[in-house]
Image (cartoon, rainbow, N blue to C red):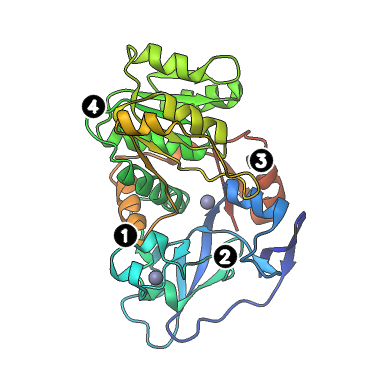
Amino acid sequence: MKVARFHAPGDIRIEDVAEPIAGAGEVKIRVRNCSTCGTDVKIYKHGHHHIRPPRVMGHEIAGEIVGVGEGVTGWEPGDRVQVIAAIPCGQCEECRRGHMTVCPNQESMGYHYDGGFAQYMVVPAKVLAVGGLNRIPDELGFAEASVAEPLACVLNGQELARVGEDDDVVVMGAGPIGCLHVRLARSRGAGRVFLADLNADRLAMAAALVRPDATICAGDTDVVDEVLKLTGGRGADVVITAAASGTAQQQALQMTARQGRVSFFGGLPKDDPIIQVDSNLVHYRELTIVGANGSSPAHNARALQLIAEGAVPVSDLITHRLPLAEVLDAIDIVSRGAAIKVTIEP
Ligand SMILES: [Zn+2]
Ligand SMILES: [Zn+2]
């Protein structure tokens, strides 16, 4: 079978390898869609300390079961499934307390295990053990189902930031994650949703799809001023930074309303993670700053449901569908911000 394997930074190869076999507790799937995101770009450029090459990449996975290992019950060939990306251990103190997104023993598809940029893939027993395999509703395509994983992360972020009825929400970053944040905020009853990005073209492309109440091009406007203007000086109830930008994080704190919540959804580069915070803003305005680290199996199941019932449409966000042989083109398109969602069809 064909796979796309990471060998070293800048070195991803399309290779022929033997099909994997489902061992005890595992299932084998025919991958139908594995979508790409900024994480794949990061791995391609810099590698990752959890990846020991060669490793099949790809973590936004949907496919069809073709083989079931010994001891697996409830699944059979032909079942259409979506697979979680982050695998909690299910046994540590955090997992027992229900904090699966911050399991210190977390492993990931495409990092510790071969991922979905492949014609066939084995779903590890650990994924099944934590309920990480979700049945795709009949009416839903594989490509849409593969977007359940990033939407699950977005859902985790908005739950932590308590996005709700009538909230004015600012999303900073108009990539696929930003688009999903806008759509999910709407489905949670947000009042107005504003979308900001440095890149005017990307902002226009995203806005045409997700229709925010206003766009703010951070390249030529002061975002803080603009948000204060749009909200009558009050600021936004929730500001989400869906970009790896310390500047965006600092701006977020300056445009959050009293008792507002700031989500540092996107992480910062490992070598530059320090920002300046006016602690008195947090103190007197009673702000809450939250993070977001991936998603739990339960978030994946709910995200898939939200997509299936039309609460968060994603099909129009999938702007590019490419075969496995063009995975490098896909990564290039994503890195240039020239697409919303790019999915690989192996
Ligand atoms: Zn991703
Ligand atoms: Zn755990």
What residue type is disc 1 on?
Ala
**Labels in figure, total:** 4
Which of discs 4 and 1 lies nearer the camera? The answer is 4
Which mark, by number, is residue 298? 1
Which of discs 2 and 1 lies nearer the camera? The answer is 1
Instruction: Report if the beta carbon of the residue with label 3 is closer than 8 angstroms to ligand 1.
Output: no
Please tell me which residue is depicted at 40% across the width and 56% down the height of the picture: 295
Please tell me in which quarter of the rendered image ligand 2 is found.
Answer: bottom left
Nearer-N-terminus badge (2/4): 2
Which mark, by number, is residue 115? 2
Residue identified by numbered label 3: 335
Residue identified by numbered label 4: 166
Which of discs 2 and 3 lies nearer the camera? The answer is 3
Alpha carbon of mark 2 to alpha carbon of mark 1: how far?
20 Å
Report which quarter residue 16 is drawn in.
bottom right
In this orientation, does residue 24 appear? yes
Q: How would you rate the neighbour count of disc 2 (Cα within 10 Å): few for under 14, some for 14-19, many for 20 or more? A: many
